[in-house]
Amino acid sequence: MSEHPTMSAQTSPPAGAGPTIATRLAAFAHGLRLEQVPPAVSLRARHLMLDAIGCAMAARGEPFAVRLAAATSELAGDGHGGRAGVVG
């Protein structure tokens, strides 16, 4: 069975292409230091993270969340116990 061309596991851009947007974003994030972020932006980011965590906690018993957790645990495979060290 042949693989769909848009679903291939290509891991690098075509020859002659510049860095991907993901590579550029990763480089930016890697080089960013908290001291460079304006205080208002830092505060807003922290509030948004707390909001996301609160939403995740509030939804954890909902049917869609239970199915998602089961699917994610199954994808993790044996030996992972369904635990993650980070959210995301």
Image (tube, rainbow, N blue to C red):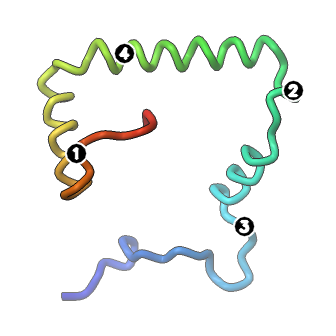
Q: Residues within 10 Å of mark 1 (few under 14, many from 20)?
A: few
Choose the circle earlier in sequence order: 1 or 4.
4
Choose the circle earlier in sequence order: 3 or 4.
3
- As helix, strand or loop, the secondary structure at mark 3 comes to loop
Q: CA distance from mark 1 to mark 2?
A: 37 Å
Left or right for 22, reference 1? right
Q: Which residue is mark 1?
A: 81
Q: Which residue is mark 2?
A: 35
Left or right for 20, reference 32? left
> In the current view of this chain or complex, which residue is farthest to the right?
36
Q: Which residue is mark 3?
A: 19
* Residue sitting nearer the eye, 5 or 80: 80
Q: Taking 12 as reference, is 36 above or below it?
A: above
* Residue sitting nearer the eye, 78 or 15: 78
Query: Residue at image x 62%, y 81%?
Result: 14
Q: Which residue is mark 4?
A: 55
Query: Residue at image x 39%, y 76%?
Result: 8
Q: Position of residue 41 (x, y in %)?
A: 75, 18
